[in-house]
Amino acid sequence: MSYPISQIEGLDQDEIKLLRTMGIRTTARFLEAAKDAKGRRQLAEKTAIEEPRLLEYANACDNMRIKGMGKGYLTLLRKVGVSTVRELKYRNPASLAKKMVEANKKQKLVKFLPPEKLVRRWVEQAKRLPLKITY
């Protein structure tokens, strides 16, 4: 799935405008541009966005390839220690769903928690997705 880059949490309006002028308008295009260290370095030079932030955004775009994974759920996953598709595919869905409930009780990140069945589908999709990011 691909979304407008405005759906990437953390990007400010100036960065979004700058990326759009470079032809990067979607999460899929951003992921393609920032999938490896060389691409992130080039983007950092052109945008003045620091490479670690670009990697964080690339990981978010990678996760957004999973059906049903939106901005709010990405934030919730990060709070429970899952930042990448690579990490997600090794998680126990029941345990992950439980941790998400606990994190959301404390911080109220999303209105509707994903049911365990959806978390299970995310993990299964993560296992099938080809890895896009190199570190």
Image (spheres, grey):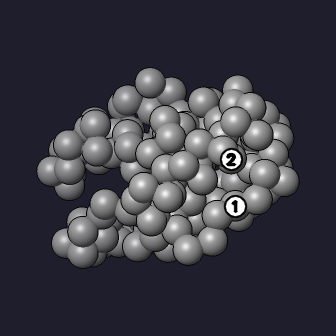
Mark 1 sits on what residue? 114
| In this rendering, position of residue 127 left or right of residue 48 | right
Distance Cα–Cα, label 1 vs label 2: 7 Å
Which one is earlier in the sequence, the residue at label 1 or at label 2?
Answer: 2
Which residue sits at x=54%, y=49%? 102
| In this rendering, position of residue 15 left or right of residue 7 | left
Q: Is residue 116 above or below residue 42?
A: below
State the quadrant of the C terminus. Answer: top left
Give percent across and percent down for residue 44. Answer: 23, 44
Q: Is residue 110 above or below residue 106?
A: below
Which residue sits at x=33%, y=45%? 54
Which residue sits at x=40%, y=59%? 107
Which residue sits at x=45%, y=65%? 108
The amino acid marked with disc number 1 is: Pro
Q: Is residue 95 above or below residue 90?
A: below
| Label 1 element class | loop
The amino acid marked with disc number 2 is: Ala
Of 28 and 72, the residue lying toward us = 72
Quadrant hosting residue 28: bottom right
| In this rendering, position of residue 46 left or right of residue 23 | left
Give percent across and percent down for residue 57. Answer: 40, 50
Q: Are marks 1 and 2 in contact (CB under 8 Å)?
A: yes
Q: Residues within 10 Å of mark 1 (few under 14, many from 20)?
A: some
Mark 2 sits on what residue? 97
Q: Residues within 10 Å of mark 2 (few under 14, many from 20)?
A: many
| Label 2 element class | helix
State the quadrant of the N terminus. Answer: bottom right
Give percent across and percent down for residue 37. Answer: 38, 29
Residue 126 at least partly seen: yes
